[in-house]
Amino acid sequence: MTLEARHVLEFPGGYTRTTGPVIGRFLTELRDGRLVGVRTAGGRTLVPPLEYDPGTGDAVTGEFVEVGPAGTVESWSWVHAPRAGHPLDRPFAWALIRLDGADTSLVHAVDAGDVKAMRPGLRVRPRWRAERTGQITDIESFVPEVTKIVSPVRTEYVLKPGLALARFLEGVAAGVFVGCRCGSCHKVYVPYRLSCPECGIAITEEVEVPDTGTITTFAINNLPDPRAPEVPFVSAYVLLDGSDVPMITLVGGVAAHEVRQGMRVRAVWVPEEERTASMANIKWFAPTGEPDAEL
Ligand SMILES: [Zn+2]
């Protein structure tokens, strides 16, 4: 026969002790919905705060810093069957959580729904109780951060040339390049645009620039393109005379290996009766035969 005596240690009404300034500050901040740590003399942030640096035994500095509220799960233990007194009445994890900005970790419950959702590195956030009293249970549990959503996507749009591009293409239809000059920095942009990318101000002055220019850079292409079916062909940035920004175009009327930086070129327009309001009006740029320009 086994003798057995059951002992219960209980303080009816609760056991009251004072918290001291460090833990007290932590609990007070919890009541206000904030998480704080305390700094050690060595610059580490302890969460939960302690009165002494566990590494050196020195008193902490008394400097409190806000941490989290999000953090990262370092390790955990899954509770399949919660018991009375556990923070949740459904399976959950006891986890070691490193709050953002903290150098130590705290233990708290993670309500992940399923053990399969738990992993080291899982990002979690506190779920606060509405009524807080200054206890660690003011955080009911931590919950995984929302990291993805599934939402139906459908977009439908019609592209129209903006006012500026429309104005430029109008010019191209008439065989001229329409640009604009910024009233502040005086740069000339071709194609025409409504605002200066450098000054950010609206541009109102329209200018026409000649159809001659200088090749600033170029590339020899060995793959055919609908606009340049014969390879190799050359695409180049051409700085039109009087413009400050080069435009990209094809180069023709010259062997690819003869194209060079500084080469002077002129637009070759399609015959007037074939012109439309599009860049197809320019067949390409061909050498003018002038001496190369200084870049
Ligand atoms: Zn400007």
Image (cartoon, helix red, strand yellow):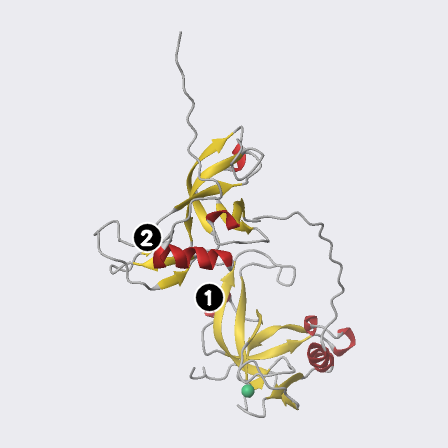
The residue at 69%/70% (across/down) is 280
| Residue type highlighted by circle 1 | His
What SS does tag 2 mark? Answer: loop
- Quarter where residue 46 is shown: bottom left
Is 21 positioned to the left or the right of 85 in the image? left
For the residues carrying marks 2 and 1, which lies nearer the camera in this image? 2
Query: Circle 2: is it few (<14), some (14-19), or many (20+) Cα within 10 Å?
Result: some
- Quarter where residue 172 is shown: bottom right
| Residue type highlighted by circle 2 | Leu
Query: Circle 1: is it few (<14), some (14-19), or many (20+) Cα within 10 Å?
Result: few
Residue labelled 1 has its Cβ within 8 Å of some atom of ligand 1: no
- The residue closer to the viewer here, 183 or 44, is 44
Whichever of labels 2 and 1 marks the residue nearer the N terminus, that label is: 2
Ligand 1 image-quadrant field: bottom right
Residue 284 against residue 145 in the figure, above or below: below
Is 59 positioned to the left or the right of 199 in the image? left
x then y, percent, for residue 47: 37, 52
- The residue closer to the viewer here, 115 or 221, is 115
Give the number of callouts: 2
- Quarter where residue 282 is shown: bottom right
C-alpha span from label 2 to label 1: 75 Å
The residue at 46%/84% (across/down) is 291
Q: Residue under circle 1?
A: 257
Residue 290 against residue 63 in the figure, above or below: below
Q: Residue under circle 2?
A: 50
Is mark 2 in CB contact (under 8 Å) with mark 1?
Answer: no
x then y, percent, for residue 178: 66, 84
The residue at 62%/62% (across/down) is 228
Q: Farthest residue to the top: give it.
A: 1
The label on residue 75 is: none
